Each structure stands twice: as C-alpha cells, then as structure tokens.
Amino acid sequence: MIPRALTKKAQTLLTQFPIVSISGPRQSGKTTFSRLVSPDFEYVNVELPDQRRMAELDPRNFLERHRNNVILDEVQNVPHLFSYLQVFSDELNTSGQYILTGSQNFLLMEKITQSLAGRVAILTLLPLSYFELSEKPSVEDFIFTGGYPRVIHHHAAPEDFFPTYIQTYIERDVRQLIQVQNLSLFQNFILLLAGRAGQVFNASALANDLGVNSQTVESWVSVLEASYVVFRLRPYYHNFNKRITKAPKLYFYDTGLLCYLLGLRRKEDLAIHFAKGAIFENFVILEVMKLYFNQGRRPQIYYWRDSNQNEIDLLIQEGMHLKAVEIKSGKTINTDFFKGLKYFKKIAPEAQSILVYGGNESQKRSDVIVYAVNELDRLI
C-alpha cells in the first residue's frame, strides 16, 4: 500500500474539527485512505441500499446508531442527513467525530456549505501523484497509466480499467445528476473533450460539433467537473493593460483516462501522438494541483493569454507572490522555450519565471529557473 501524502494533514485536522470531509474521484482511494487515517473508526457505506434507506427513513435513529468516530462513505447519497449531522455534531462538541467522503463534489460541497460551515475541514484526494510513488516509473509511463490506485497497485491494464471506469462510474454519475436522453451522444462528447484538452474551452463550438445547444454542453461539462473527470483552468484577470482571453482552458483529472480517450493503447505511441504537448501540459498542471491538495491547500492556479496569443501555460499565485510557468514536453532545451516567459516578464517583472520541460536536468538560465519534469515538485 502506497502511503498517501495527505495522511498527516488529515490526522491533524481530526484533532481540530468535529468533521473532516474528503472528496475526490471515484476509485481515487478515499475509502482506503479514510480507514488508514482512522483505523479505529466505524465504517458505514451510505451507498449500500440498506444503509441509505435507513438514513433516508430515520436519519435521527441512523446517527444515534453511528454517533461518533464514524466514516460515512459516499454521504452525498443522503443529502438531508447533513442537517442532522450539524445537530449531532454540536451536541457532542468534540473533535474527530466523523469523516465524510464523497465523489460528487457539487452535491457534497453544496450540503457542507448549507449545513456544516465552520464545523468541517475540507480535503481533496485525487488519484496518486507521481511524487507519492516510492518506486517511480518513467514520467512517460505514469502519464500513460495515470494515478488511479487500482492501476498502480494491482497493475490493471489501462485498456481493461478505463472502459469499465467510464461505464460504471462516469456514466452512472451522469444519470444521477442530469437526464441524458442519448448516452452515446454523451460518450461522443467525452471523446471530443479529450481532443480539446489543454485548449480554450468553447461551448458553442462543441455544441455545433455535437448538434446540441451550448447550454447542454455547459451542463454536461459541469457534471464531469462535479464528478472529478475534468477541470477548467481559469484565466488570470490581473490588469496588465492588455486585452486577455477570458475563457477557461480544459484539462482532465487523470492523464491515463485522457490517453485512453485519445485512443492511445501503447505507451510508446505517446511520443508521436498529435496531442503529446497537451497531454504533457495536463500532467504538469495536474501534478501541481496534487502537490497543493496533498498539503491540504487549495491551489490558486491560472493561465494567461492576451489578444496577440502571447501565453503563459500556468500562473501560480501564493499570496502576493506570482510564479509564471512555461511547460514544454521537449527533452532538449530550446531558446524558443523562453519566449513567452521573456514577454511576460516585461509586463509582470515581479513574477518568478520557471520552465518545466521533459528532460532530466534542472538548471538556472539567467533569470529563469528550469525544472526537469521529474523534479517539478520543487516548484511548490
């Protein structure tokens, strides 16, 4: 079992808050993580029909039976339970009462903010980070397989794991959250999203390709965001007296899933695939997110592009400090890699300039810090 970097933070928060919430994709290891963090806690899976029915019909009695030191797994399945949790938590008035897990972020966070504000610490557990692995594969291997624990622990082949994952989890969540009349059309939508990973999200263009309206596309993307399949990277709005792109860019929460959706069936094909640069960019941004989440912190990350197509792939805001990160998949440093950073330095001289590239040698180049991709954890 690979130790998760979030463990220490979760154990600390359980001594400070009555409730700790752990959200993340299905199969990201939330249940295993929760039980390892607090092995003496009672475990209750609210997704099981009998437990869910009991919680729905008699929530007070349900919580009386599971009153303290309890893991409630997939608790978003019983939304009205949150109001009772508030009452029971206040009555006990102690730390470490409940661990709540959920894989539908919108539903979980909506109920937390409505009923449990001030009582709950919120953590996010994504699939395994490259930097959580003690025996690290090549970066290319990890990009191809992704970080889902079943793929890593049990060596499940991506072509076996991801079709089942899509059918049993992604499509099920879609049916629970919204009514999709044509499931094959939604499947095609996911494939089209994969082909646009790393690009500016354009709902109207997607709608035209699918033959639906843009409101439908927005609804479907929101569901995939809520289920931790995709995320949108927002543009940086700081006023540099430049016209800037205001639409977000779209990425996937797992590069293994992205590679599978793009039709990659052998890791050797990654090097020659048309989307190699976008996949590599997705990997770097995702790993930065994981580094923050695994410290219990919310990443303040953005991208920047002006009307002349000058662009910075990733901006990291830490208080008043700004890091401008250019991401290049090439293994040999090229002077063109620094073009965007040099331009951005003219309009934001206070920003730290960083290049992450696909090679294996970190170095300092004038006023730019260069990180090899397998050392990008030094960025945070």
Image (cartoon, helix red, strand yellow):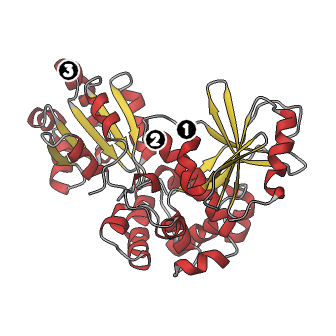
Q: Which residue appears at 15% of the width and 43% of the height?
A: 39
**Amino acid tagged 2:** Phe
Which of the two discs, 2 and 3, labels the residue nearer the N terminus?
3
Query: Which residue is denoted by mark 2 in the rendering?
Result: 293
**170 above or below 39?**
below
Query: Which residue is denoted by mark 1 in the rendering?
Result: 299
**Amino acid tagged 1:** Pro
Q: Which residue appears at 79% of the width and 60% of the height?
A: 334
**Quarter of the rendering containing residue 244:** top right
**Amino acid tagged 3:** Thr
Give how far across and how far down residue 16 sits, in percent.
29, 22
Residue 44 visible in rendering: yes
**57 above or below 229?**
above
Would residue 49 be found to the left or right of residue 243 on screen? left
Label annotation for residue 43: none
Q: Which residue appears at 60% of the width and 58% of the height?
A: 282
Which of the two discs, 1 and 2, labels the residue nearer the N terminus?
2
Query: Which residue is denoted by mark 3 in the rendering?
Result: 94
The secondary element bearing badge 2 is classed as helix
Circles 1, 3 touching at the beta carbon (< 8 Å): no
Would residue 45 be found to the left or right of residue 2 on screen? left
Q: Which residue appears at 43% of the width and 66% of the height?
A: 171
Dot 1, how many residues are within 10 Å of its Cα: few (below 14), some (14-19), or many (20+)?
some
Between the C-alphas of marks 1 and 2, the distance is: 7 Å
